Amino acid sequence: MIQEMTREHLNPPELHIVSDSGYVELDRSWNHTNSLQPYSCLYLVAEGEGVLTLRGEEIVMRPGNAYLMPAGTVFSYRCDRRLVKLFFHFNILGRDGLDLLRNLQEIHGVPMREGELDEMLRLSKGELAQSLALRHRLYDVVSRLLATYPAEQMRPQSYSTLVSRAMEYIQANLSYNLSCREIAEALFVAEVTLRQKFKKETGRTPRNYIEELVLFQGELMLKTTRMSIGQISSKLGFCDQFYFSRRFTAHYKLSPREYRRQENG
């Protein structure tokens, strides 16, 4: 009997490395309260100990283990003496352009395999072939961590052709000023039809989705570029940076300046 694999199994969402990554030795200066990042943080502990705090519960990071802080999780971290770790920051984006892990909101850890961390460190210093091998190892670690979370919380959604095309158009022409009428005209469909189908399949209006996606991109730009807040607001289609700041603060409870000042962990 032949078991066929679906396209979704053979082409899963990609893991996008963002921001910085590296091998670091930390001391007591590694200390931050209520860190909020637009990407997931993966820590592979080599030596020492660190402490993560989520909703009042402390999780001690120990050598030989990998720990995942999913995108959008608000957590605190500290090192009481010494911590040596390899770390990566990444996104796994769904068809809607938003991070698939944003609903997990839990910190999980798994043991690393013998020699796994040393092998990843060796590969991180190599050329193209070694870089591809490192990415393979990274996928393996992340997949073992994700297997400890409820699968339904990160399952990619399926959408009709119309809604999928609308999302693709929005992502390709992303701007806070983008209107449902413009999208409908580009797709040669009635605006009311687009609104109804979009709301039915996604649970939000095109306007709500555009704002959510725009602010998510704003998060990423604040953390991964040196663009000024004014440049970011202009690129995202806001009339001025003050309105961008107002919408961003209402959504994240932090101003863009405060959000950018947070340490990356």
Image (cartoon, rainbow, N blue to C red):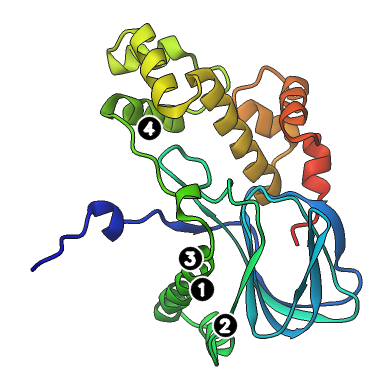
Between the C-alphas of marks 1 and 3, the distance is 10 Å
Distance Cα–Cα, label 2 vs label 4? 38 Å
Mark 4: few/some/many CA within 10 Å (<14, 14-19, 20+): some
Residue 166 location, quadrant: top left
Give the labeled residue for mark 1: 141
Give the vertical position of 85 relative to 145 (above or below): below
Q: Residue at x 65, y 63 (%)?
A: 20
**SS at mark 3?**
loop
Could you tell me which residue is drawn at 36 percent across and 19 percent down?
A: 197
Q: Which residue is mark 2?
A: 112
Q: In percent of the image, x 73 and y 81: which residue is there?
A: 62
Observer-nearest of 39 and 178: 39
Q: Is residue 258 visible?
A: yes
x and y percent of residue 71 in the render? 62, 51
Which mark is drawn over residue 147?
Answer: 3
- The answer for how far apart the CA atoms under marks 2 and 1 are is 8 Å
Q: Earlier in the sequence, mark 3 or mark 2?
A: 2
